[in-house]
Amino acid sequence: MTRSQTLVLGVILSASASMAQSKYVNDVLALNPLGYWRLNGDGNDATANGNNGVLLNGVTFTGPGGGAPIGDPNNQAASLNNAQDQYISMPTTATSPLFALDWNHPLTMMVWVKTTYTAGNMIVLGKEENSGNFRGPYLMVDNGDSGSVPKGSGRFAMVIEAGTSNFILVDSSVAVTDGNWHFLVGTYDGSGQAGGVQLYLDGNVVPPVASMNTLNNATSLNSVPVTIGARDTGGVPYSGLLDEPAIFGYALNAAQVLQLGSDSATIQRILPQLAFGGGWYTALYFTNTNTSAVSFPVNFTASNGVPLTVPSVGGSSTIVSLAPRGTALIEVPNSGPLNQGYVSVSLPLGVTGYGVFRQSVQGIADQEGVVPLSSASSTTSTLIWDDTAYVTSVAIVNPSSVFTTVSIVIRDATGATIGASSVALGPMNKTAFILRTLPGLGAMAGNRGSADFTVSSGNVAVLGLRFNGAAFTSIPTADR
């Protein structure tokens, strides 16, 4: 097998509908929240800390699929009606040292909201008293009750409060009450200043407005529980859908928030093969069809599943920022020995892209092939092959944390099965070969037809290359 024929397209898989957790959920848990409440039909804490919630005043939940768009088609959300003062309380957090988050303690609060309510302020997540000094931190939808923003403006805000005239209030500059799902994140660095608050909407930084900055170092500690959809005992209740609230004992950085936003309100796409050096060059093109700027992460992974350092980008990942209707190019030059892997991207809606491979061989013209970005969620991938006068190469990757077996069935042009095989792959492993050299698939030689690659759990995506001497082209797949 020539080097050209062994340069095959990689496969990457992401969490699918059949898996227990989406990438978003795994990434939240990997950031070690103090509490994370999925709201999938109950108020249970998804962390090992076990601070489960109590549903108060008739809280209900959506059906499967009605939750925030976090990559889980069965996700649910809490449905709250402020006319009935519905909220969720976590009693064991009231005096837990985990949640002793005084004014000088950094923290992060985040939650997904879907609402059109603009008649009054709404607290979405907090640990705040409902009387006295109203001490504690919280996130809210600010509809202008205090005069800090116009009435009915629906802007989200973060508050660190130690008294009725002793608090930080930082509002966003945009509304979140348009009836769509929005991912709200507020971080605080413990400085006691409004400048220490950063707000994020749908993964991106939003300009903050310091509406109050009078915190004077008095304690904001309290002995009331964390609440979702109101403050303690149901004050300032929320109306609409709420999902995935979490609290962290430190301030997440912009890259971490962007990753969570990319996990959710985006489409997971893969450039299934990355090759550079040894005569190969790879490029990625992206364009933004939206009228607003977007940013998203691009990650490079080696064939053995570990991060792959790409010298031209200075690491194993980079952030692409696109102006409205802007276009970006990432080039991975032909330099040094051959390196192979794949590229994973979380494309915001309205962003498209593709890859380009180029092979340079002395004495012949450079060969190029354009490769579409592949979906990252399928359990069966079908590839059309033609080995009458060509060679079909494939690669298969298992990105999960468990061993898996990929079943392969080949059919001829009449649809008759002419061979079958399987490939066992360890966690995050990749295998590559000329397809007809796999035991049981020799009947491909001199024929044309299709091949199904199927996993019984998880996901699989496959792409191939067809070679005709030095010339090559990509083979797209039908994924389902």
Image (spheres, rainbow, N blue to C red):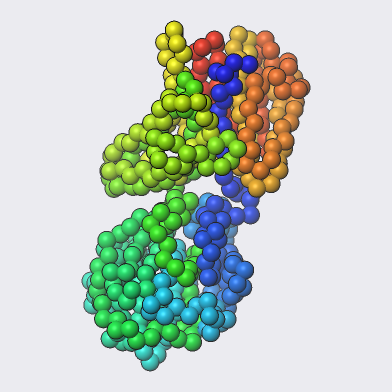
Q: Residue at x 40, y 90 (%)?
A: 131
Comparing 99 with 311, the one in front is 311
Q: Is residue 338 above or below residue 399?
A: above
Give coordinates of residue 51: x percent, y percent: 58, 75
Q: Residue at x 63, y 13 (%)?
A: 387
Query: Can you tell which quarter of the image residue 379 is in?
Result: top right
Query: Can you tell which quarter of the image residue 150 is in?
Result: bottom left
Give coordinates of residue 180: x percent, y percent: 40, 58
Q: Is residue 136 above or below residue 156?
A: below
Q: Residue at x 55, y 81 (%)?
A: 96
Q: Residue at x 61, y 19 (%)?
A: 392
**The C terminus, quarter of image:** top right
Query: Can you tell which quarter of the image residue 353 is in?
Result: top left
Comparing 251 with 293, the one in front is 251
Tell whether 271 sits left or right of 253: right
Q: Farthest front residue?
A: 336
Give coordinates of residue 406: x percent, y percent: 70, 35
Q: Farthest bottom residue?
A: 132
Tell whether 17 sits left or right of 124: right
Comparing 466 with 179, the one in front is 466
Residue 459 visible at all: no
Circle count: 0
**The N terminus, quarter of image:** top right
Give coordinates of residue 281: x percent, y percent: 43, 25
Q: Is residue 378 above or below residue 164?
A: above
Residue 316 visible at all: yes
